[in-house]
Image (cartoon, rainbow, N blue to C red):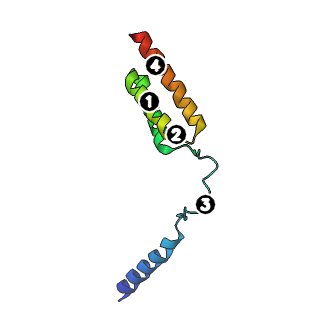
Amino acid sequence: MARLFFAVALLSGSLLLGGCSLYRKVTGTPPPQDVATSERPPQSLYNFKMGREYAAQGRYELAREQYLIAYAGAENDAVMRDAAAREVQAMDMIIKTQR
């Protein structure tokens, strides 16, 4: 009987303490100050990143294509469009010098 009481007390105590965890509701809270956020289109950022990776590997035609896709995806973001346009021009110059 004492073991049953102890098991029930231990179980109910663990259930009560489960609500005291460090988990906090994320929705509605601003991001921490040490986390960088961006308002850039996520697909354009991904394509821009892939362009950089392809350029680092020496795959300039693929890099150029990724930059063009990033340019097309950033229709309302002038900064992203300018950066992608500069990278496309750079890839064009590299491709022309290698031919």
Marker disc for residue 92: 4
What amino acid type is highlighted by mark number 1?
Gly
**Residue ID for mark 1:** 51
For marks 3 and 4 on the same chain, the one whose residue lies earlier in the sequence: 3
Residue, disc 3: 29
Label 2 vs 3, first from the N-terminus: 3
Q: Nearer the viewer, mark 2 or mark 3?
A: 2
| Amino acid type for the residue under numbered disc 2 | Ala
Under tag 1, what secondary structure? helix
The earlier-in-sequence mark between 3 and 1 is: 3
Mark whose residue sits in front, 3 or 1 = 1
Residue at 49% across / 77% down in the picture? Answer: 16
Mark pair 1, 4: CA separation: 13 Å
* Callout in the foreground (3, 4): 4
The Cα–Cα distance between marks 1 and 2, rounded to whole angstroms, is 15 Å
The amino acid at mark 4 is Asp
Spatial CA span between label 4 and label 2? 20 Å
Is residue 94 placed above or below 28 in the rendered structure?
above
Callout 3 amino acid: Thr
Residue in the foreground of this view, choosing between 23 and 79: 79
